[in-house]
Structure formats: structure tokens, C-alpha cells
Image (cartoon, rainbow, N blue to C red):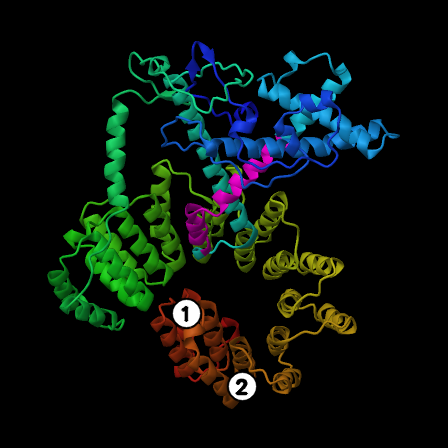
Amino acid sequence: MNLRNFLFRIPINKASRRNGRVVSWSYRQISTTRCVTPVFYAADTSVKNSITPMAHSLFYRFIHAGQETVSSGGKGIVSVSGDSEDDDNAVMNEFLSRFVWIMRGKLTEVYTDADKNAIDAMLRIIVGKVVEMNMQGCLDQSSVSHEFSEDLWNTVWEVSNVVLEDMKKAMKKEKMKSFLHSEEVKEMARFAGEIGIRGDLLRELRFKWAREKFEDSEFYELMERMRQEGKEPEVETEILEASESGMEGVNVDDDDDKEVSLPKRSGKIKYNIYGLDLSKPKWSEVAEQIHERGESIWPKEPKPISGKCKIVTENILSLQGDDDPAPLISEWKELQQPTRVDWIGLLERLKEKNDQLYLKVAELLLDEESFETDVRDYSQLVAANAKLNQFDAAERIINKMHEKGIVPDILTKTTMVHMYSKSGNLALAKQTFESLRSQGFQPDRNVYNSIIMAYVNAGDHKSAESELRILESNHSKSSEDIYLAVLQAYAQQGDPAGAERIVNRMSFAGYQPSRESLTFLVEAYSRKGHPDDARKHFDDIIKMGYKPDDKCIARMIQAYAQKNYLDQGLSLLLQLEKDGIEHGPATYSVLIDWLGKLQLIDDVEGLMKKFNEKGISPSLDVHISLCDMYSRVGQEKKALQALGVIEANKEKLSSNEFEKVIRSLGAGKFWKDAERVRDLMIDRGFTPSVDLNMSLQASRMFDSNNKKPSRKLF
């Protein structure tokens, strides 16, 4: 009994007294486990008398499934019955079985010359004394006898502690298994599997949930025991020898039963969590507000759709993106009488079917009172339209917000910056970006990237570099693609100084020089007319182990063409061909333009055959160069043929390309064609330069007087 109480900490809530003495029962009277006397039982009466019937079973191992603990909802009273005694016997049998197994090994190590019978005799004496002390309630080191040596008692207590610890672990393991297979843990594991959790993570979570249930169970059992101990204090019991009268029952005196309750707390309970006093009245108001807000966040389930409303719902879902959903939405509203959760359910179904229809219906619901529109609804709708490049619809929703006096939140303004930058509306992008700053919001890297790209697309590369500096001052850096976009803008403008600054910024940001960045430097110096600097960066590309692409070679040849360094250009091409680096259409286009200006018609036509051999159509730049060459040499038919291709692609021409074509036609005395191309230029929204208009007016005057116009005008 004492060993079981020590293991499970179960208090004795009631004790029986008779004639002022505590009465106990002998083990033979209460044991229901059949014990078989071992065959090696000694004949020595001194040993036999010291062995109780409990010791007879110490060499036979009994298997039990674990102890049933007192539940948190029980009465808390442990009655002395046959079942409890069975539990005691099972615990004692398990303890002695483990104890004998370990102790036998200890004795065998010390007494190497002793045979099996001697070891068994020693074990009977040791175990008999342990059982006797347990029956007397003296199972501790303070009550040891002098029958054994101090070393032997130390070994006994060491083995006992090991056995008790192993039994506790075994019981916890069995209890943990029961929680692993409990319905609550199975339900949570099933739900985790449904949402996509698999493998080791699912096993870890299931073990964690079972451990939490196990800890909660132990905690509530401890609290229940503490409550019972406070209600009926444990009575100290003394185990005496069994009376010779063979008493089989014990009467319980009701006068001896005492119930003791915990003292009542005076004052209010204070709850302090991390230094915060939650017992103040204001926290009750906060709890009510949280509850009210929770009802709006987690609303009730949508109403069931049935009858005619179900038919109307199917009709709404079958609409196409170009159809008007307003009539069916009105009918559905009258039939269903929806709340916000019903509208959201309908929108989710529409979103799965048709994105365009979803956006139309969502925009209609912004004006619906039962939908309870908030700022977040506007923000999500603006973001959805901007993602699909429907900028007009997004602008319409933003205007609705302004009409209703709704101030866009940070998320909406961030979406607006991305949208305006993507659509190329630099003015509105800047305005929204500055509005974010004025509200004290620090834009993140994505917002800065959007406004930088807006400046780049608008040709304002200096402002883009300024935003890069601001982003770097905030201890952040942009992506390599953004740096390359700004670098490309400087290269296209022919600004090598700005391009060099961006490359240096990339180095400080941790981006090493690459083929793309060096190619843009070659382009910047080429457009500026510095072939030597361009060649330096061109050679750097090769030194780094890269092969320059066709565009890079074309830019290098163009740099030589501006200075008319024909020898250097041809030498570069031969060297590249020797190194196995081939050039393509872009290089051919630059060579045709260069040789066309030199009026080397045969060489140009030879290069044109390269396009036919490779099956590549010449670009628009090639036709502009051919028109210029044939116009200046007076080959009208071929010039007009090239001009026809140019007019067919007039939407792709820039202002400089228009002027180049007009001047070449004027140089060939094709005045009417030149004026027609100028009219096309004006229709495209470009304004001819003053020099070009004066040249055309002078050509008309010379033509009316049948005089040959001076070519210096063009």
C-alpha cells in the first residue's frame, strides 16, 4: 500500500479506528493474486519467518496495463476494497520483479564464486527485508536496520530508486499512448491532414497535442488531489501485526471522519500577466469590445439558397464577362435578403467562375447598403483591376472613394503607385508617392522600385537615380534589375558619366560587373562618340570570360562609324570572327547604315544577301538606311521601294527617324515624297524641327525656278 501511494501520490482520505488503535489487514487476508511458492524456497526457519506471503511472488513477473488514476470529476475518496488491493498487488509485483532482476546482477558481480542457490538465498533475505519494511511503512533510508551493512543498504536504495523511476516512465509512456489515440488528438490530426500537413511535421504535431493533453490531465489530477487533501486531511497510519482474532472487517466510526476545506480568500483576485494588471474594470470593457469585433470578423454562416433564388444564382454564374449582371443581382437581392456574408459567398463563387464577372459584380456592390462596404473592399478591388491591367476600372473605383469622402488607406495608395507606374502615368504616381511620405509612411523597396521604373519609362533617369540614393540612405538597396534599368536609361541617352555612377552604386550595393552592365557602358560611350572608351569596356567583357552578344558588337561598330574609323571596325570584325564570335542582324544593320553613307552600294547589297541566307527579315532601321542611300545616289525606284516599307511601319518611327527619311528624300530631290512623310510625322504628333521646315521651303523655291537645290541644306 505504501509503495503504491509513493508511486501515484494517492492520499488515504479515510482511516478506520477501533478502540483507539489503528487496525490493518494482513497481506494474506486482502490479496487476491495467487502466489506460487518458488521451488528454491529455503528450509531455514529464520529466513522463512522473515518472508511474508508477498515475497513468495517476487520471482514471478506479473503484466499489468497501467494504473487508473482518480479523475478530476470524482469524489476524491479511495475506498478499501478488493479492486484497490489488486492494484496494490500488481504494483508490488511489478516492483519486486524489476528489483530482483537488477539485484541479481549486482550480487552476481560481487559474489562471483557463489552458485545459483546461494544467490537465490541472498535475494530472499534482501527482498524479505524490503517487503517487511514496506508493510511497516518504513520505506526510507532513515529507518534502516543494522542487519545489513551500509554498502548493502546503499545498493538496495540505489536499485529501488532505479526501479521506481523506470516504473514511473513506463506508466507515463502507457498514458501517453492513450492520449495519442484519443478522439480529440485524432480529430486535430485529421484536420491537419486535410489542410495539407503531411509526414514528419504531422507526426510532431500529433505528439505535441498528445503531450499537452497529458500535461493538462496531470495538472488537473494534481489540483484534485490538493483539493481532497484540503477537504479531508490525510491521517497518519501505523501498520501493526494482524490480530489473532482473524478479524475480517473493520467498522468505521463516523465521529472520526473530518472534513477540512481551504480557507476563503479575502479581497479581489488580481491577475498580473507580464506586469499588466488585468483585474481593473477597464479590461472588462476591452473584452466586450473584442467580442463585438470578433462577431464582425467571424460572422455567421451564409443563408441556404433554395427555390427560385437558387435558379437566379445559377443564372448569375452562367453570365459572360460582357453581360450586364445588374438585373439578376437586383432580383437575387429581393429573394435572398442577403447580409454581407451572403454577398461574400456569392462573390467567391463568381471569382471561381469568371474574373471579369466577379469584378463587375464587386463594383456594383460598393454602392449596396447591405454589403457594408469598408475601405478594404475598395483596396482589394483596385488591386484586382490593376493586376489585370484594367487601369480605367481602377481609376473609376478610386473616384468613387473620393466622391464618398473615403480617404484611401496605405494599402490602397501603395497599389495606386504600382498601378500608375505600370501604366506610365508619372504625374499621378509622383503625387501618390508623395502622399504616402506626407502621412509618415516609409515606403518599402517595392514601392521605390515602382516609382524608379516610372521615372525610367518617362525618360527622367536623373530623378530615378535620386530615388535610388534615398533608398540607399534608408539602409536598403534595390534589386539588380532596377539598377540595370537606370543604367540602360543613361546608356540610351548617351550619358557615360551617369552610367559610370550607376555602375559604382551597383558595386557598393554588392552587385559585381556583369556582361549586361558592361554592354550598357559600351552603348553609352558609343552614343557619345567615344570609341576608345567603348572599346575598353568591350575588351573587359572578353577578359571576364564572356562573349559579347550581337547588340554589343553593333554598338561597338557604331562607335567606330561615328568617327568613320573603317579600319578599326573591320579589324574588330575580323578578330571576332577569328575568335569564333559571330555577329548577327544588329551588326549587319549598323554596317549597312555606315556603308550606305559612304555610298558603297555593292557592299551594302552584299550584306543584304546575308539576311536572305539566314532567313531573317531586315529591320526597319535597315530600310531607313537603304532609303537614305538610294535617295542620295538618285535610284528612285529602290528608294521608293524602301520608303513603302517605312510608311507601312509609320507607327514604329520616332521623331529622329522621320526627319532622317525626310532629309534623305530632299537630298534626292523627291520633294513630294518628303512633304508626304512630313505630314505623316505631324499626324503622329511629332513637330518637325525649324531647320527641316526651312529646308523644305527652300527646296520648293528652287524647284519653282528649276534650279538645283544645294545639298548642303540637308
Q: How far apart are the alpha carbons under marks 1 and 2?
A: 22 Å
Residue placed most toward the observer, 267 or 398: 267
Please report the bounds of the magenta region as a residue range: 165-193
Q: Given this view, does label 1 or label 2 mark the residue nearer the observer?
A: 2
Mark 1 or mark 2: whose residue is earlier in sequence: 2
Residue placed most toward the observer, 663 or 464: 464
Q: Secondary structure at mark 1?
A: helix
Left or right position of 705 against 101? left
For the residue carrying disc 2, how many other residues have a C-alpha within 10 Å: few (<14), some (14-19), or many (20+)?
A: some
Left or right position of 676 against 208? left
In the rendered structure, does residue 35 fall within the stretch colored magenta? no
Q: Amino acid at mark 1?
A: Met
Q: Amino acid at mark 2?
A: Gly
List x then y, in percent, for residue 105.
77, 32
Q: Which residue is mark 1?
A: 694
Residue placed most toward the observer, 212 or 337: 212
Q: Which residue is mark 2?
A: 634
Dividing the picture into quarters, in which one does residue 568 lie? Answer: bottom right
List x then y, in percent, for residue 534.
67, 59
